[in-house]
Image (spheres, helix red, strand yellow):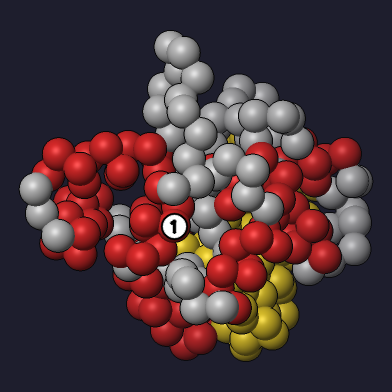
Amino acid sequence: MTPDQPWLAAVWPFVNAHLPASPATVLEIGCGSHGGFVPALLASGYSAIGVDPEAPEGPSYRRMQFEEYESRRPVDCVIACTSLHHVADLDRAFNHVTATLVPGGALVVVEWAWELFDEATARWCFSRLAPPAPEAEPGWVHRHRDNWATSDRPWDAYFQAWAAEERMHPGDQIMRGLDVRFERQLCTYGPYFFADLADTTEADEQSAIDTKQIRATGIRYVGRRR
């Protein structure tokens, strides 16, 4: 992972721990413009494809929506890292994941239960933001802090309106859809924001969760195709 991808670097150990042995075939949904986990997968000996409308150029990427991608043969594992809450049709996406996997294939998911992002959690995050670098684009947590401050609305009203405008699927809906189609191997709720905060580790966020200062909004899930 490159230095400007702290989130990918932070969750890679979890993803890597639940992959089948290389040289298995792995597909990543929503790899983004930097390629997501695909470079690390290729370096580890996997046959990997990243699917995203903004994917990089190259033979290991497909620039399209995942729902439109047709794999020539089923893959051994699908990775979805903070991509499922953005898909237009969740059921269609889940059905396509099932069709893309071999029977018994693994699904590794990192997600965000945005519906649990309450005011106490937001204030905890905002208090740990570093000043934006000069001429740099503000991060997403910075933008929420600033937009809420100028909205003149309670946090819940502000954030629910934003989520509705973005048409984001809540974490509990994602989990219900997964459990219908996959055998759950693991599902935990824990840290999510630490990579975007200053001087804050995953352990720091977990400690705040454990002491009930904030809520656990990060989902880590592993399932097997039924």
Q: Is residue 161 visible?
A: no
84 and 116: which one is in front? 116
Left or right: 110 in relation to 53? right
Q: In terms of secondary structure, where does tag 1 sit?
A: helix
Tell me what residue is drawn at x 10 percent, y 54 percent: 153
213 and 145: which one is in front? 213
Residue situated furthest top in the rendering = 135
* Local crowd size for mark 1, using a 10 Å CA cut-off: few (<14), some (14–19), many (≥20): some
Tell me what residue is drawn at x 53 percent, y 66 percent: 218
Q: Which residue carries the number 1 mark?
A: 124
193 and 103: which one is in front? 193
Tell me what residue is drawn at x 89 percent, y 54 percent: 23
Q: Position of residue 149 (x, y in %)?
A: 20, 43
Left or right: 51 in relation to 14? left
158 and 150: which one is in front? 150
Q: Position of residue 162 (x, y in %)?
A: 20, 52
